[in-house]
Image (tube, helix red, strand yellow):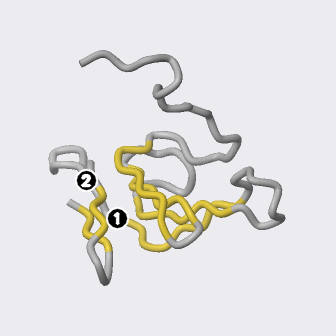
Amino acid sequence: MEMSDKSAPLVESIDVDIGSAHGLVCAYGALYVVVSGNAAQGPGFYRVCDTDGDDQYDDVELLKSFAMRQSKARFNSLTMRLQNMLIS
């Protein structure tokens, strides 16, 4: 099934220092991001918000940092459940 131009999703880049995103969920008025690289404040779980109501993300908050070793598997997905989010 082909998508027409009218139904194609709009993809926009965001102008915040986050980088190396592996999992994204847009929920509760924010963008939640799993970062596995050394971008932003290092590997972790981040919330990205629009703080001034201009429909542009402008604030990055580290919610949980991850201690990662090069030999270990990296987190690469984010799943939203009814009551919480699961990072895997």
Disc 2: which residue: 75
The label nearer to you, 2 versus 1, is 2
Q: Position of residue 70 (x, y in %)?
A: 24, 44
Q: Secondary structure at mark 2?
A: loop
Q: Is residue 57 left or right of residue 43?
A: right
Disc 1: which residue: 66
Query: Tag on residue 85?
Result: none
Q: Residues within 10 Å of mark 1 (few under 14, many from 20)?
A: some
Residue at image point 65% right, 41% down: 14
Q: Quadrant of residue 21?
A: top left
Q: Secondary structure at mark 1?
A: loop
**Disc 2, disc 1: CB below 8 Å?**
yes
Residue at image point 31% right, 16% down: 2
Q: Quadrant of the N terminus?
A: top left
Q: Amino acid at mark 1?
A: Phe
Q: Position of residue 83 (x, y in %)?
A: 31, 83
Q: Position of residue 66 (x, y in %)?
A: 34, 64
Choose the circle earlier in sequence order: 2 or 1.
Answer: 1
**Depicted 20 relative to depicted 52: above or below:** above
